[in-house]
């Protein structure tokens, strides 16, 4: 079954909302009026789909950070092992940021998983 025109429009709007800095810019990019965008954002089904896509996008970004965390650790290790040289400050800052964001994302995912398991334990008991 193919998508309806409104479903395609909603998909495009979500992509525009994620790639612009304002509702007006998203509306313009999607070829919709600002009023239509606001109406869609008031629709529970649209908001749920928008949240789902935002969550998937964030998970992809955190997966990239986690993948790069080993490189960040190696970078810091090399800097620690060598004498100080020019240009290390930005590399250290970037590596630290990658490691911190990766750790934060891992902690949140772990917490989310633990809550999910606890909630399901309660369902199994019923």
Image (spheres, helix red, strand yellow):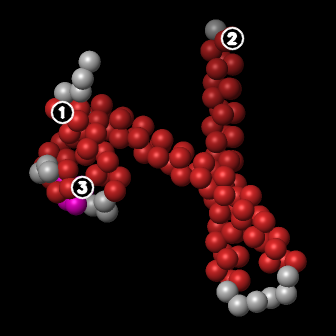
The crowd level at tag 2 (other Cα within 10 Å; few <14, some 14-19, many 20+) is few
Residue 17 at least partly seen = yes
The crowd level at tag 3 (other Cα within 10 Å; few <14, some 14-19, many 20+) is many
What residue appears at the point 85 percent right and 82 percent down from the top-left corner? 82
The crowd level at tag 1 (other Cα within 10 Å; few <14, some 14-19, many 20+) is few
Residue 41 at least partly seen = no
Q: Is residue 98 left or right of residue 3?
A: right
Q: Position of residue 59 (x, y in %)?
A: 54, 45
Q: Where is residue 79 in the image (x, y as percent from the top left)?
A: 80, 78
- Residue range in magenta is 23-27
Residues 87 and 54: in front is 87
Per the image, the residue denoted by label 1 is: 6
Per the image, the residue denoted by label 2 is: 125
Q: How many labels does the image show?
A: 3
Give the SS element for disc 2. helix
For marks 1 and 3 on the same chain, the one whose residue lies earlier in the sequence? 1
What residue appears at the point 14 percent right and 49 percent down from the top-left corner? 32
| In the image, residue 42 lies in the stretch drawn in magenta | no
Per the image, the residue denoted by label 3 is: 26
Q: Is residue 17 left or right of residue 93?
A: left
């Amino acid at each position: 079954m193919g998508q309806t025109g409104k479903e395609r429009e909603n998909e495009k709007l979500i992509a525009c909302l994620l790639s612009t800095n304002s509702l007006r810019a998203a509306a313009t990019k999607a070829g919709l009026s600002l009023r239509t965008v606001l109406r869609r954002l008031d629709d529970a089904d649209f908001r749920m789909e928008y949240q789902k896509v935002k969550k998937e996008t964030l998970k992809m970004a955190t997966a990239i950070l986690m993948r790069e965390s080993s490189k960040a650790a190696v970078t810091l290790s090399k800097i620690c092992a060598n004498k100080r040289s020019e240009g290390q400050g930005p590399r250290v800052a970037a590596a630290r940021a990658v490691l911190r964001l990766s750790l934060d994302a891992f902690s949140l995912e772990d917490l989310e998983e633990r809550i999910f398991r606890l909630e399901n334990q309660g369902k199994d008991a019923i």
